[in-house]
Amino acid sequence: MRRSPIAHEPFITTRLGPAIDWARKNSLFPLPFGTACCAIEFMGVVSSQFDVSRFGAEVVRFSPRQADLMIVAGTVVYKMAPILRTIYAQMAEPRWVISMGVCASSGGFYDDYCTLQGIDQIVPVDVYVPGCPPSPELLLDGLLKLQKKIDEQRLLEKP
Amino acid sequence: MPNPNPDRVRGHLGEDFLADCSSHGDLVYAVHRRGHRRVLRALRDDPELRFDMLMDLTAADRMHLPQRFERFEVVYELYSLWNGWRLRLKVPVPADDPHLDSIHDVWKAANWAEREAFDMFGIRFDGHPNLKRILCHHEFVGHPLRKDYDRRRGQWCATTETLEDELQLRRAAEHRAHNGQAEPAEALTSERMLVNIGPSHPVSHGTLRVLVELEGETIKHAIPEIGYLHRGFEKSAEKGVWNNVIPYADRLNYVSALSNNVAYVKAVEKLAGVEVPDRCKFIRVILNELSRIMDHCVCNAANIVDVGALTNFWYLFSVRENIYKVLEKLTGARLTNSYTRVGGLARDLYPGFADDVRAVLKESLPYVHDVLTLVKNNRIFQERTVGVSAFSATEALSYGWTGPCLRACGVPLDARKRDGYYFYDQFNFDVPVGEKGDAYDRILVRFEEIFQSVRIIEQALDKLPGGPVDTDRNRFVLPPKQEVYRDIEPLMNHFMLVMFGTPVPPGETYDSFEVPNGELGFYIISDGSGKPYRVRVRPPCFYLYQAYPEIIEGSMVADMAAVLGSLNVVAGELDR
């Protein structure tokens, strides 16, 4: 009796749904919509000391067509709002949004005539990361929270 | 910093002289609007005075101030590079007919500054080629920095400008330049291509937008649009007490927040007449120079990665991360430190700070040397930067350039050396200058300044004096907590400072500080209420970026990235 050529390799069994969820959450392609100070901290997250690639999200794509996670890092003002809206619309499904920092989440301490008081008025937000700017660890924590959320979406088990 | 001969200046004002408003060591004259243009031109061309730079042009709404000629005042801050003199002219403008002559052809720097004054105050500048909004969006109604505009009245924007109007102006100017031998408009548009770059684009360093018209790969016209990060610094500054502005100042140039902190409190201290102790000055110098190292590292890292060398980005970012560790230990924050206070600092240095800084510098400098070795004589890097966007010193001065970009053009202007505040005149350091003013020079000047900053830090650490860090003037800094709980007088001081703010007497002044990007100036007006009446920032990169279209027109489209990075335009400071 011939043995299967892969029989001596280690293997695991699983269902297709969780395998897809696992793959989706660990290969996020972020689009940095960086406007202000938070974008500098985002650069810190991507660079060597904090290294976002440990969590599978290091392939930064500046084209919305190639990204599935928009990280809005920084203050969004009314002048920028139509652009944020357009770029979000250009992203393909499935897509997620992390609102990095208090400015993006609520306007922060820019409570004035030109600042949009929270990007959730124009795009849906999955994870809010507080801080002004958030420390890199906090953004990584937000990323892990998003991964948990994606994991729980159970792609193939939807009714 | 001595002032020019007042009589000679007065001679130029002639019959347009309104009043002598000099105060706080600044020479200030009020001039009638019928002749301010003539006066400014004469001051520029006077062979002895030589006010060849318009440092800043802004306006103020003096609605609630008791002393005023008219409701609005347009303010011109002049600088004589040759003599190191400063002069401020104020031109009153009535509210019922707010207009005066434009001076965009006297100094090129005035073009955008006048647009901003129009945007914020509704003052019209007659003869301006393109007087339209610059920071607020085009659907905005009203003028936000007027005192009767409600700070929180936001206005939605649904569309983005096409910039068609400015493009037509440029094309018309090009036609005129060809002696009227205009090609038909159709022929032009069919051969050329419009490319919109930004405001969300990897080379745009934040939120800059440029519309370029290309012929092949050559840029024929470039039209920048700014204001995508205009978040109302100057209006927000008016809402709280003087110390409340410090966190906002952090977020102007967020790459070197501490420099902005120091620049702001230094201006307020000048207006209040407060002298800080020597230890405080030394600490501010050290922090300013650490910020300069970080700022230059981030700028050069981004610039070099823009021309395709990624390794250097990781190297230079390591320097920044190392410095952040010290700053986080000292201030509690990595990026936005808010460490200074009017009259002192938030707290003294922690024990062992000097050793930490020395260790960090020792650890970081090899990275900078490595990067310099990798790029300095690298042929690919040189091809991308040498001779790209060379800019003459005359043009740079007309545009109001300061900082490393101006020094790369060969002008050794460094306010630290020249004005000598905070003992900078006693530190031993050089001011590096470039030759051609191209992107390569700008990058190398920044590298050299990193090493000079290290020299300053080492000297300052060696000579760091002891003693208190806060001024001993009452009501300027919070008294120690133990005394507040024990005695009535510190308790009162604490209460008054928290409730009513720093007692800055009525008046106004302009103060400049050499931050990594150039001259960061603050023009501040106090009405004595404990809150700022007006805080105007003179952002260095606003004036740098204004020259951007002129530099890149005629270059290749790929040079846009190399040039933009070398100017170090930081959107938070540009748009405020």
Image (spheres, coloured by chain):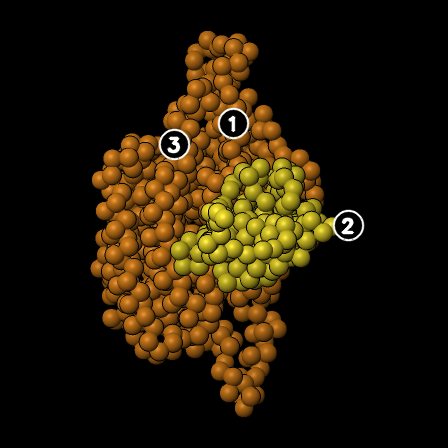
| C-alpha span from label 2 to label 1 | 46 Å
Instruction: Tell me if B10 is positioned left or right of A80 in this view.
Output: left
Q: Is residue B345 at all visible to an observer of this figure?
A: yes
Q: Chain of mark 3?
A: B
The residue that label 1 is drawn on is B195
The residue that label 2 is drawn on is A159
Q: Chain of mark 1?
A: B
Residue drawn 31% across and 67% down?
B357
Determine whether B470 is above or below B305 in the image.
below
Q: Evaluate if marks 3 and 1 touch, with contact meaning CB atoms under 8 Å apart.
A: no
Name the residue nearer the viewer: B266 or A75. Answer: A75
Q: Evaluate if marks 3 and 2 touch, with contact meaning CB atoms under 8 Å apart.
A: no
Q: Position of residue B167 (x, y in %)?
A: 54, 24
Residue type at mark 2?
Pro
Q: Is residue B149 at all visible to an observer of this figure?
A: no
Image quarter in which the N terminus of chain B is found: bottom left
Looking at the colours in the rendered structure, which chain would you say is drawn in orange? Answer: B
The residue that label 3 is drawn on is B559
- The numbered dot on residue B5 is none
Q: Evaluate if marks 2 and 1 touch, with contact meaning CB atoms under 8 Å apart.
A: no
Residue drawn 29% across and 72% down?
B355
Tag 2 and tag 1 share a subunit? no
Instruction: Tell me if B520 is positioned left or right of A102 in this view.
Output: left
Tag 3 and tag 2 share a subunit? no
